[in-house]
Image: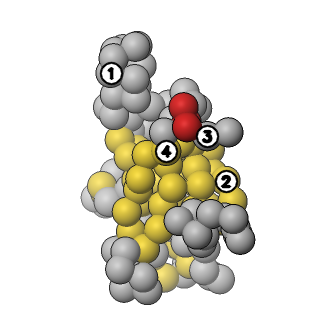
Amino acid sequence: MCGDVGQGSWEMVHTIQKCANHGWNVWESKQRRYSSAELSGGVYVPSVMEYEHTVDLHPRTRPDDRSACIIGGPTIESTVDACAQGRYLFADYWGVFWLGHEHPAALGTWVMERVDTRRVV
C-alpha cells in the first residue's frame, strides 16, 4: 500500500504492483485530468481509496480546515488488536487518521474508517 499525494484535488491510496502504472499525470483518483494525454508504460491500476480536498476534517472545531496531503503509513501487523490487523493506517497532514481495508476481504472493495484519535493511548 502507498499513500499518493495528488496533483491538485485528490489524495489516494494505491496497492503496489510490479510494473503497474498508477496514472500520473493523466489520472488523479478516478478523475481523468487530461483527455488527450496517454499513459506511458505498464498497465493502468487505479487507486483503491481516495478523498477529495473538499473533505472538512474538523467541522466542529476548525470548520475551514480542508484536507491537504496524504501521509501513508504501515499495514498493521497486530497480535493485540484483531480489529486493526492487516489494515492500512494513513493520515492527512492536518492530523486525521484512517484505517483502510478490503471489505469483504479479497473482493476488491476498499473502505476507509476514520480513527477516533481521542481514544488512542
For badge 2, the amino acid type reads: Gly
Question: Mark 4 and mark 3 in contact (Cβ < 8 Å)?
Answer: yes
Q: How crowded is mark 2: few (under 14 residues within 10 Å), some or many (20 or more)?
A: some
The coloring applied to the image is secondary structure
Q: Which residue is drawn at 33% across and 17% down?
A: 60
| Mark identifier at residue 79 | none
Give SS at disc 4: strand
Quadrant in the rendering for residue 27: bottom left
Residue 34 lies left or right of residue 12; in this view the side is left
Q: Residues within 10 Å of mark 4 (few under 14, many from 20)?
A: some
* Alpha carbons under labels 1 and 2: distance apart: 24 Å
Which residue was labeled with disc 1?
Answer: 59
For badge 1, the amino acid type reads: Pro
* Alpha carbons under labels 2 and 3: distance apart: 16 Å
Q: Which residue is drawn at 50% across and 31% down?
A: 68
| Vertical comparison of 31 with 110: above or below | above
| Vertical comparison of 72 with 78: above or below | above
